[in-house]
Image (cartoon, rainbow, N blue to C red):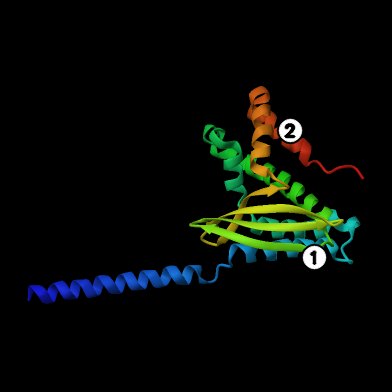
Amino acid sequence: MENIHCWRKMIVTGSILLILSGFSRAGTAGIPEPINMVRESVNGVLRLLKEPGLGPDNMREKRRRMIMGIVDNSFDFREMSRRTLARRWQEIGSGEKDEFVEKYSTLIKNHYVGKLDSYSGEPVTFEKQIIKENRSAVFTHFVRKGEKFAIIYKLIKRDTGWLVYDMVIEGVSVVKNYRSQFDSILRNEKFAGLLKRIDEKNKPKSP
């Protein structure tokens, strides 16, 4: 009898584990590979940048909203913000964190789209991806006037899929570059001063 109970227990336990693992696989089955996510996002932005019916005059309106929507769905701006502020992230309140993420994400989107705009119309190569647990890197090359410029996308895996948390553009990490700039500002102007500086950078440039 005791052996029968043990076997029943093992069967039930095994069944539960199989069900749970099935749910886990089902939850990740529809998630695109990092390189495919980056390819879809980049090509989507470039397609809009080249769209004849959405020229530069409309950039601040419909085309810009569409492009920013693609970028919003491809990036984890909160993770990027946390990594950029590093230890200072823990020193600020939740409201300040939300405000920083909002302003910083606008800065990043403007910088990124500006970079892609300078490469629009040129061939893009999505070379390879490296995946290590919940982190990955996608290596790409943009060609302009016969010269290659590399952008490495660093991604983190979330429940909804892979999201970008840093980019290494022509050998320079966006997160590290802004962290260095922000550290200097924070030492002299504190957090309010940093937000003001970001606001100034985010202001639309006069035509």
Residue 46 horizontal/vertical position (percent): 79, 62
Residue topped by disc 2: 197
Residue topped by disc 1: 47
Residue at 64% x, 42% y: name it.
Answer: 175
- In-front residue for pair 144/90: 144
Above or below — where is 74 with respect to 53?
A: above
Does residue 38 appear to the left or right of 113 in the view shown? left
Residue at 70% x, 60% y: name it.
Answer: 70
Residue at 70% x, 53% y: name it.
Answer: 151
Residue 28 horizontal/vertical position (percent): 50, 68
Q: Quadrant of residue 45?
A: bottom right
Q: Residues within 10 Å of mark 2 (few under 14, many from 20)?
A: some
Does residue 136 appear to the left or right of 189 in the view shown? left
Under tag 1, what secondary structure? helix
Residue 155 horizontal/vertical position (percent): 59, 54
- In-front residue for pair 91/130: 130
Does residue 174 appear to the left or right of 147 in the view shown? left
